[in-house]
Image (cartoon, rainbow, N blue to C red):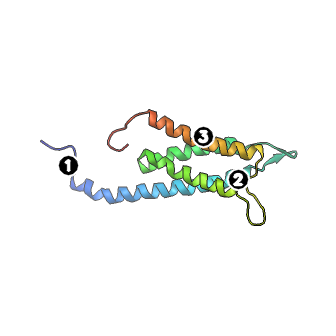
Amino acid sequence: MTSEYAQSPVAAERRPVDLALRIAGGVVAVLAALVTGVLELLLAYLRVGGVLIGLAVPVTVVANILLARFAVAAVGRRWALALPALAWFVLMVIAASPTEEGDLLLTGSWVGLLMLLGGSVTFAVVAFRMIMQGPRGPRS
C-alpha cells in the first residue's frame, strides 16, 4: 500500500524549482503592487477641463483585485495576498506623508481618499471571500 505522501524521484527533484518559482511569484507580486501603486498616484491628479475625474479609483480597485489573485496563484498559498496588500498600503502611507519641504504625493482630495478606501477595502473583500471558501486541501 502506497502512502499519499510518498514522492517519486522526479517529484523530489522538482521541489527546489517549485519553491524558487513560488518565491519569484511573491517578489513579482510585490513589485507589481509598487508599480501599479505609482501608476495610481499619477492618475490621482488626472484632470479634464480643470476638474479631477477620479480615474485612479476604478484603476486601483481592478488592479488590487488582479494583484491579490495573482499573488495567491503564483505562491500557491492564500496568505500570499498579504504580500501585494502590504506593499501597496506602505506605498500609499509614504505617499500621504509630507516630506520635510511639505510636499505630498497623495493629498486629501476626494480622489486620494477614495483611492485609499477603495484599495484597502478591495484587498479586505478578496481576503474575506477566500476565507469564506473554506479549506482548499493541504496547500491552503
Q: Residues within 10 Å of mark 2 (few under 14, many from 20)?
A: many
In the image, what residue type sits under mark 3?
A: Val
Considering only order in the chain, which callout, 1 or 3, is on the residue closer to the N terminus?
A: 1
Answer left or right for 46 relative to 118: right
Task: Report which residue position mark 3 lands on.
Answer: 121
Q: Which mark is residue 6?
A: 1
Horizontal and vertical percent position of residue 15? 31, 56
Residue furthest bottom in the image? 100
Vertical comparison of 82 with 122: above or below: below
Answer left or right for 106 relative to 25: right
Q: Which mark is residue 104?
A: none
Q: Residue at (44%, 44%) from the top-left corner?
A: 78
User: Real-space Cα distance between discs 2 and 1?
Assistant: 50 Å
- The quadrant holding residue 139 is top left
Which of the pair 100/56 is nearer the observer? 100
Residue furthest left in the image? 1
Single out the mark in the foreground, 2 or 1. 2
Residue furthest right in the image? 49
User: Real-space Cα distance between discs 3 and 1?
Assistant: 42 Å
Answer left or right for 60 relative to 51: left
Report helix, strand or loop for mark 1: loop
Is the C-beta separation of discs 2 and 1 under 8 Å? no
Horizontal and vertical percent position of residue 58? 68, 40
Which of the pair 47/127 is nearer the observer? 127
Q: Residues within 10 Å of mark 1 (few under 14, many from 20)?
A: few
Task: Report which residue position mark 2 lands on.
Answer: 41
